[in-house]
Image: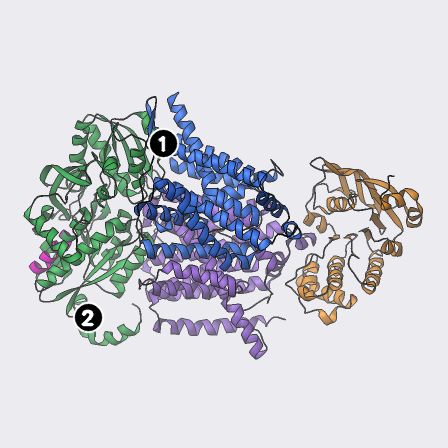
Chain colours: A blue, B purple, C green, D orange
Amino acid sequence: MDLSFVFLVEVLYAVATLVVISAGLAVVFGMMKVINLAHGEFMMMGGYATITAVNLGVNVFVAMLVIAPLVVGLIGLVVERLVIRHLYGRLVDTMLATWGLSLFFVGMATMIFGNTTTGISTPIPGFAVGDYQINGYNFFIIVVAVALLVLLFAVLRGTRAGLIARGAMQRSDMAAALGYSPDRIYMATFFCGSALSGLAGAIVAPLVGLVPTSGINYIAKSFITVVAGGPSLIAGLVSSATSFGVVNQVFAFAVSPIMGDVALLVTAVILLRLMPQGITSRFFKGKL
Amino acid sequence: MQTPVSKDILTTLVVSAILIWLAPYVIGTYTLTVLIIYGMLGLSLGLIWGFGGILCFGQGAFFGLGAYTYAIAAINFGESTLPMVLAVLVPATFALLLGAMMFYGRLTDVYLGVITLVVTLILFKFINSTAGPQYVIGKARLGGYNGIPGFQTLNVPGNPDAYIWGDAYYYFCAVALVIVFLLVTFLLRSSFGRIAVGIRENEVRIALMGYDVAARKTVLFGIGAAIAGLAGALFANWGEIVTPTLFNMPQSAEIIIWCIVGGLGTRLGPILGAAGLAYMKFLLGQQSTIDNTLITGLILVLFVLFLPKGVVPAFSGLWKISFGRRGFGKMHDTRRKRRARHG
Amino acid sequence: MSLNRRELLGGAAALTAASLLPRVAMAGDVIKLGSILDTSGPFDAYGKPMDQAMRLAVQEINAAGGLLGKQVEVTAYDTQSDMALYSQYGQQLTRQDKVDVVHGGILSASREAIRQTMRKTKTLYFYNVLYEGGVCDRNIFINGVTPAQQVEALVPYAMKKSGPKVYILAADYNYGQITSRWIQKFVAENGGEVVGNDFFPLDVSDFGSTIAKIQGVGPDLVIAPLVGGAHLSFFRQWAASGMKDKIALASTTLGVGNEQKVLTPEEGDGIMVAYNYSQQLDTPENKAFKTAWAAAYGSSDNIHETAVSTYQGVKTWAKAVEMAGSMDRDAIIAALESGISIDGPGGKITVDPKTHHAVLDVHLMEFENQEMKVIETLPQRQPIDTQAVCDLASNPNDNTQYEL
Amino acid sequence: MVEIVLESSGLTMRFGGVVANDNVNLKLQARELRCLIGPNGAGKSTFFKCVAGLLTPSEGQIFMRGQEVTGWRPHQIASLGVGIKTQTPNVMDGLSVRENIWMAARRFHSAVEARERGDAMIDRLALGAIAKTDLGQLAHGERQLVELGLVAVGDPWLVLLDEPAAGMSAEDVARMTEIIHELTRTAAVVVVEHDMQFIRSIAETVTVFHQGAVLMEDHVDRVMADQTVRNVYLGKKA
């Protein structure tokens, strides 16, 4: 009983992690059809922003939830103005340019922070469930993931900005016809996407040792999650994160963590072979 | 129309002979060898991406597969001839299977990218976790993270004790690259190659003409993998060890960067891009003021923004303007392949 | 041989002597020491102080007048924690730079990447890291701790303090694989039982499911030969899930890279280890060493196990060179095989002629307040694991890494 | 007995809940010219795509020269000797006119013969002046013409054309009409079109699509005179 509860928490945690690390990429891909391959490095910078802030004496939650998204969002803004906006509509070129940016940021971080492992301790203590101990931080990540999804849904459904964004998602010329500059919509979207990436990096920072090359560990997983999710933003994110998270944890428990990763990747190949445009091209069509 | 075949071959042979002779006076042969091997690897992606429109994010997988196949076979056979052949065949077969799965499933651009990326990651993770003694192929331990050291290196066929190494190995690799380059030239001049370019330009049209696009893309993908596999085997001989890093993401990323910088849709571009950037990385690796990765990244961004056609087509264009004829590195002179690059 | 300009010029001068004594002729008036270490990347926590230790030792040798009247010159490469770079730089050190001796390599993977190159080019090679044991090669000298010296001491101590049910978490490459087999052997010999054994590739940093799994099995003791920056997260996550005070923890690697200073006392205290060196060792050699280090680098805080091994390795090599009186490789090997010993910061260290391994002191320690407190010292332990399989005196052409 | 080269039987195509084709039965004789007309959304393009292999019908069968080809892929259908031209100019923009036409001819002939036949086709279409120009640099009408050349060079016995006259000048249309008539000497031709002017100038038999089904099938003059057809085109309820 206790073990199955622990298992359930681990599965939820795995799904939540995938949601958190993919949200930024999903927003940018869903709205702008831009695959940001520097997403992993945006996360890495979010991690460094958090650790630097904590070392300067800032409260860890303020650092994670406010400082990291802001810092990375601003970096994203600069990147959008300097590079991305020249490449809209050229999917493969944006992928290559953002790949270049990812290498650039790795190099930058190496020069500033050095190529060493840094980290902070988790700010939430563990607690007991029956005979078992659970990492309290797992719950925090689950809460953040749920909050993130609710927030995304509320913004897209309930606000004027969300309405425009949804319009831009369907038909980019539509928003322009309504008098909103697509340029500004894209700028705002990229800022939000980058901020979400920064937040994700900050959230996972206490769990792992951070190095300038940490981003590579996330980009593949989040890239796969987003692409397998397909055209619908929230439904796609939730459905693919759930499929991958469950598969990953089942195999991680039954065999080993590495088999969990392999099973996740194999699932991705099968999913894409069956549904070449992603899960939500077949199910939950037209949902958010 | 195209220059006559004989003239093309002659130019290739003369230029490459001069380069092979002169290069060792500038750069040590040990370094040159690896630049040549990277050139071949660049050519393998340049062929399938630049001429076939297939953007493969996992070309490194075939490189690694070739290297591992060679190492495992060499340990088991104790000589190098059959392992060299296998190192070409195994990646090619793997690519044919993978390609058939992707192309008959009508996967394109981003989705193609994801699948090739994922397959590379799976191979990397698998090879990386084979440290235990249970992972054995014949006499060869897979070795996991440690890779496989101490295999038989290249020998004269039929005589396992006559090693080809040092300067001789440099000439061997250089000649291999010239041969592969000529084979690619013939391929691109053949009907198959010309239709492959047609597929890059417009897949649907080619299908409506009655060509089996999926089959042709699969075959081209396999040919690219065979070349990458050969490069992998040569690399294994050069480094005398194979490790899982051959499969990892940065390796595959670099191949794409070589092609972009050198120039897509040319045969020479990816080779020069590979050799040039690898040498630059080698030089940069000796200083520590500016981080190596930072410069590589910056180069990629700047090229995508300002010189998306790459160096060779740009110079070729200049040459054409100045002398009113084609540069020798160019073939099937195409405008930017919007469709192929932008999905 | 490559045909670069430098060698074309130098070639003529060296031509006459080359056929007789190539290495001496090439070296000229300095002795070239090649170093190959990860001073950046995930393993730099090990590599950086090793580099400093190597340079400190060379500096001391040169200050004392060098070797055989010549200064020692360092040629160092940073392999950036990338195994592929080892083979490349290994080739460069031996074929282009033509060094007299190579010190370096950290992970077993990196040692195996260059060992054959060193052997082929007849370049004497020192590997100064604690490792899984079993390497039997006349060209290599190893002065790190092996499992028989370390695990044999650590396992009974840790089991006595906790209980008989042991769970092993090991890094997934040859060090982790082989070490975990040694642990299994010693656990069984001490009447215990191994209830689980998991391996993790070096880039794994999420141990959530593993920690839950361990709880399901319920061992008394977890022994963790985990390696590198990513694996450090295990100890964080272990503490974060509140397991630290419930199940005892021992490691064969934690602290080698001064991890006790990276972990908070809450995360680290009580973890049991056994090594050749601790900064808390109270010997005159250690005190002198720490003073010299602090004078050279400002603070002695970053000294650790493998740094000391490197220092001791260079000093052992220097003593053998003086004894041999020449830079001839076979003469130096003969000197080393005479069983020479030095008194290093970790205690007395003697070359074992049969295995080219080291006889040394092992100290049982526990983490306490970001320091490694010495509990007990086991003096002059023999590398009996390697001695059981390797005898270079009777079989000098052996070139194998034996496994348990 | 006249040979039937194309037959659809009970062909139905659904997209989710939308029925784009509903039980379409159609027969086409050798060397017949048939126009498929109907307002936007009538299902004529969907029908075309099903026949060309670009879509697989939900129900029903398609036969070509008596052989069932339901669910075949475009290249298989084209290999039978069926020439297909889609709605928008579908050509290789980065390649020259000659290379484009050569590729089409190469499918059925050796490389050398393909070149000869390609050159002959270029002469026939009077494209000699622009034979070396990349398609991407040509005007819309020229591109349409080249694509027709791609279709014709394979000597098809069945030609499927989707809106060949769209966006072309009067002069180009006249040339197009001439070529289509020339094609009917050896092949049956299906033209999907909604330009009534153009249909009047080429058509004999016309099939009218409405709401996914065949509304009527008759000679062009009678169809044009039919009140129901007029209502359909004007958007009144039939």
The amino acid beneath tag 1 is Gly
The kind of secondary structure element at disc 1 is helix
Q: Residue at x 37, y 32 (%)?
A: C209
Q: Which of the 4 image quadrants contains residue B27? A: bottom left
Range of residues picked out in magenta: C312-323
Q: Which of the 4 image quadrants contains residue C317? A: bottom left
User: In this view of the protein, which residue sits in the foreground, A281 or A22?
Assistant: A22
Q: Give the residue at mark 2.
A: C18
Q: Position of residue A88 (x, y in %)?
A: 57, 56
Is C400 on the left or on the right of D203, as rendered?
Answer: left
User: In this view of the protein, which residue sits in the foreground, B132 or C190?
Assistant: C190
User: In this view of the protein, which residue sits in the foreground, C356 or C165?
Assistant: C165
Q: Is residue B128 at least partly visible in the picture?
A: yes
Q: Give the residue at mark 1.
A: A136
The kind of secondary structure element at disc 2 is helix
Q: How many marks?
A: 2
